[in-house]
Amino acid sequence: MQVYVNFNDKRWKKYYIDFNKIANAAGPKSKDAEVSITLTNDKEIHKLNKKYRGIDKPTNVLSFELGDDLLLGDIYISLDTVKREAAAENISIAEHTAHMVVHGMLHLQGYDHITDDEAKIMESKEVTIMKKLGYKNPYADECQCGCGNKCNCKNCSCCSCPGDKTISFLKKLKVRENGFWQYALYALFGGVAAFGFAPFYMWWATVLGVAGAYWLTVRRKNYSGLWHEFLRISPFGIMYAISMLWWTLNSIYVVPELTKQFAIWTVPALIGIGIFGALFFTWPFVAVAKNAMNSVSRVFMFSGVWTLILWLREWFCTGFPWNPIANIALPFPVIANSMSLWGALGLTFIIIGIIASCVELLSNHKKTSNMIVFLLFVITAVCGGFYGIHNINVASNDVSKSATIRIVQPAQNQSQKIAYTRADALKQAEENLMNLFAFGAKGDKVDLIVFPETTYPYAITDSDDMPLAKALKTNVVIGANYVSGGKVYNSMIVSGADGNITNIYNKSHLVPFGEYSLFGFMPSPAHLSHGDGAELISINAAETDFVFAPAVCYEIIFTDSLVPASSLTPNAIINITNDTWFGNTPGTYQHLDMVRRYAIESGLPVVRANYSGISAFVLSNGEILSSLPIGQSGVIDGTVWGAHKTPYRAIGRDGMMIIILLIACIGVISTRGRRTKD
């Protein structure tokens, strides 16, 4: 067979490859047959793909079959793509080029790999021809023990390094690009990743879920464009969000009247949660899907984009930065307290970096740079742990107690707060008020009584006082609706022992769909106005000033949002909330973990009063001193201590995000051009 070789890219000439021998090994046994092999680059093969196949990307090999037994056709091979793939597979360019020639020759002879059966036949032919040419099986898994062989046995005895059998197993799955199992695996990994958070605390599930989706993304050899990659990977984001946030829909079914009105929105809401997940959690994977990036650059890009997405969630539609990956570390106090140094943003960056670099290391541990970047993230985590120990000690050793505080948890259900006539409403309000008084009056006298969000049964106006505080003869913090200037607010009311209201803090971060209508047309049972943001409140307790930062409900999930930047360090944060809407679902437990995270980041203990649970005293190292479980009515008395200013609070959320982006950009740029030698 005659083989004509055209060098459209002169860089090919430095590789001494016997194209005549390779093509004849894969071609028909006829002296009169002819084939043309054009050695080119990504730019030319990209144009050919776009013109003749409607594919807007370069590929490694492109075959044009003429349908003639003698004039077989043309084969185009891109040096750029071949080099990238050879580096990724740790083989020589000559070996990978030989595979491309064999692959192209078989295409010219009618073989294809559109269906699984066709692919099996074609791959079998390729393996046989490559072995005749003296090359290894191109579809076998590379032995990870350093022997340099490729193994395709069921149980390779030479693969004994940690994680190698897992990688080998995943490779043997033969999940085809754009096939059903690819989408199913992305969805499975997304669902599994949500189990690292409370109340499950299966941190390893989150690690495996993210690692699996990362591996599924970087294993691809062909980049198919931004939006195609987004759609391909989106099942991860969809299932991750639904598995993590489904509990939000529990609120629809708490009160029968609301159920009648809003139950129809259950399925659309689930779809909306899935879209939210796709819009956010898909992009870190899309950012590393393009195969022009090497393994080290991918790690920095992936961890940097994931952290940027966490930061952006603070702003999108008033924000919902729920469950940063850093929260899976809360069962491990030393690691969790590193958030006092770099916040949930920094710890998320490190955890994601460890996950991605571990996958890259297991895929190719012979590449020294993979080991270096893995150790870099691990060492950074260890250094953070040492600072975490320091933060734990600061919070624990400062025993300068402040005010004695009573937290009241009424634990009524929402139906008990609803009435249908004016007479019933007044009677029920009076009964609720007497119930609150009974709780507040239990035990010894305290300096401050904290009641949960929206506990006070009457609306507050500018001319009102607080008779409950006067009856209890002590300072009171209580949640109520505040009406002023024709607007209604979800507020924290602060009153002295004389019943005079000294401060009214209006919630600024409102809950979309629950407290206001998103975009002006989405359903919402309430239409509240938002307050002016962070402030500090001081009350006289035990002959001294007790200064606290107020937070209503989920405001406490917004990192670096409660303490004014120019202010002194307060004694604590007082967080009043009502998780009755979510019952005994993961959301209630996760909300408490968001409180613990904020305490660590800010260096401030938290006094948390929840209407139906979980109320708690939380130290500034995230430790829960005492608490009341979900659904149990009662009170807990205590005090808090250990308030201090952490490095993270000094740097600030946005400052830390800038530092992380700088590290990620330096990591990507400084390693972008480095590749494994052939």
Image (spheres, rainbow, N blue to C red):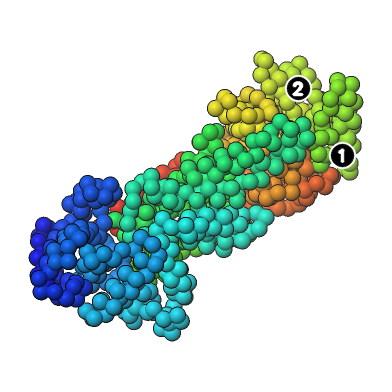
For the C terminus, the quadrant is: bottom left
Classed neighbour count for the residue bearing mark 2: other residues with Cα under 10 Å, few (<14), some (14–19), many (≥20)? many
Q: Residue 110's x, y, as percent?
A: 26, 64
**Residue in view at x 76 percent, y 16 percent:** 463
- Confirm whether residue 465 shows in the render: yes
Task: Please identify the quarter of the rendering in which residue 30 is found.
Answer: bottom left
Q: Nearer the viewer, residue 409 or 250?
A: 250
**Residue in view at x 30 percent, y 52 percent:** 669
Q: Tell me how far mark 2 sits from mark 1, CA to CA.
A: 21 Å
- The amino acid type of the residue labelled 2 equals Ile
Q: Residue 374's x, y, as percent?
A: 41, 65
Task: Please identify the quarter of the rendering in which residue 548 is found.
Answer: top right
What residue did someone put label 2 on?
Answer: 460
Numbered label attached to residue 118: none
Numbered label attached to residue 439: 1
For the N terminus, the quadrant is: bottom left
Whichever of callouts 2 and 1 sits on the residue coming sooner in the sequence is 1
Classed neighbour count for the residue bearing mark 1: other residues with Cα under 10 Å, few (<14), some (14–19), many (≥20)? many
- The amino acid type of the residue labelled 1 equals Phe
- Confirm whether residue 615 shows in the render: no
Q: Residue 281's x, y, as percent?
A: 48, 48
**Residue in view at x 86 percent, y 20 percent:** 422
Under tag 2, what secondary structure?
loop
> Seen in the image, is 10 located left or right of residue 166?
left
